[in-house]
Image (cartoon, rainbow, N blue to C red):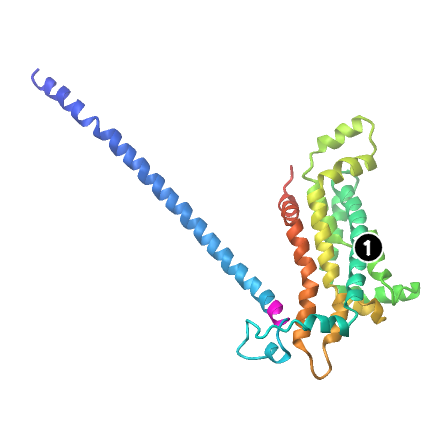
């Protein structure tokens, strides 16, 4: 009977220490969690900064070399900061070559093919994603298999066919096929994005009496703006960098795109590499500017593609 009061008197003395230890433990866990999150974020950003510097280094060297003298462009060790700045490389290049004509030819080539890819690829992608018909998936997989065929395998038969059409020497062999679904990758990209759009929207429109073309043009395409922007950017970059196609089909120098026109700077015995870098910098600038203006929509179109909703 005497030991009971002693136990009761001990319990109030030990109770205030327990909440204190609990709070200290929680604070310790929170601080360790914050340190882990901070360390993970710091390591990720460090890796991204290093990779960005590695990818940006050739661009920095190219832009810097465009302001060097012909001797500094080949000097070893590499001269990163030109001294003095040679501003005359760009006017000299534009005076030696019809650069702006090449620029306009490339822009028209890209604009026409973008229209063709948007029309044909979106229509084909709608048929593969929103319509049900026998053999749909099999035909889609066969279409994807054509991606593994290199351009060199179909070059000769296509050249013979276009020669019989009388299209050699023009941009028709490069532009007309885009209106008939030649861009398999764009079709695949749009098909995957269309599949993320709920089927209930199409079914509701069909109940209201809408036909398939109305659903395609008024419902699906407005919702697919991010994917369409990605297709535009991919096709623009492809046309801007295309060298083999114009080399095979274009023979008149006045019709050359930038990819062929800049190759005229390369001399048979000597080459002014400062001019080459000036032309490459001027040709790269439109792509960089376009990406900066469309990067948010482009990234959204890429991240949403392939997630079926």
Left or right: residue 108 versus residue 289 is: right
Residue shown at the point (64%, 52%) measured from the top left: 292
Q: Residue furthest left?
A: 2
In the foreground, 63 or 204: 63
- Whether residue 287 is visible, yes or no, is yes
Q: Indicate whether residue 161 is drawn in magenta.
A: no
| Labels in figure, total | 1
Residue shown at the point (61%, 80%) measured from the top left: 71
Per the picture, the main secondary structure of the magenta-coloured stretch is helix
- Write down the region rendered in magenta: 62-66
Residue shown at the point (25%, 34%) measured from the top left: 21
**Quadrant in the rendering for residue 16:** top left
Residue 45 on image: x %, y %: 48, 53
Residue shown at the point (64%, 48%) measured from the top left: 302
Residue 134 on image: x %, y %: 79, 41
The residue that mark 1 highlights is: 112
Q: SS at mark 1?
A: helix
Circle 1 residues within 10 Å: few <14, some 14–19, many ≥20: some
Residue 149 on image: x %, y %: 74, 61
**Quadrant in the rendering for residue 248:** bottom right
């Amino acid at each position: 009977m005497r030991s009971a009061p002693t136990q009761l008197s001990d319990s109030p003395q030990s109770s205030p220490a327990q909440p204190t230890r609990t709070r200290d433990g929680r604070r310790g866990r929170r601080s360790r969690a914050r340190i882990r999150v901070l360390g993970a974020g710091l390591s990720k950003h460090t890796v991204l900064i290093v990779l960005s510097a590695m990818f940006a280094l050739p661009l920095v060297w190219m832009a810097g070399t465009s302001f060097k003298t012909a001797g500094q462009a080949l000097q070893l060790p590499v001269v990163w900061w030109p001294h003095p700045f040679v501003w005359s490389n760009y006017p000299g290049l534009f005076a030696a070559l019809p650069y702006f004509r090449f620029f306009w030819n490339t822009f028209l080539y890209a604009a026409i093919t973008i229209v063709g890819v948007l029309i044909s690829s979106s229509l084909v992608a709608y048929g593969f994603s929103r319509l049900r018909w026998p053999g749909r998936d099999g035909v889609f997989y066969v279409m994807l298999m054509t991606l593994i065929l290199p351009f060199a395998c179909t070059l000769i038969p296509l050249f013979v066919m276009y020669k019989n059409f009388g299209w050699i020497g023009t941009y028709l062999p490069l532009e007309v096929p885009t209106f008939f679904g030649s861009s398999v990758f764009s079709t695949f990209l749009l098909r995957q994005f269309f599949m993320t759009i709920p089927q209930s929207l199409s079914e509701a429109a069909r109940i209201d009496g809408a036909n398939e073309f109305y659903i395609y043009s008024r419902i699906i395409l407005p919702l697919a703006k991010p994917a369409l922007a990605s297709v535009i950017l991919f096709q623009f970059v492809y046309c801007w960098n295309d060298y083999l196609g114009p080399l095979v089909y274009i023979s008149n120098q006045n019709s050359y795109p930038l990819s062929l026109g800049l190759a005229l700077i390369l001399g048979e015995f000597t080459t002014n590499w400062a001019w080459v870098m000036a032309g490459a910098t001027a040709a790269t600038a439109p792509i960089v500017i376009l990406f900066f203006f469309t990067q948010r929509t482009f990234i959204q179109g890429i991240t949403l593609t392939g997630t079926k909703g």
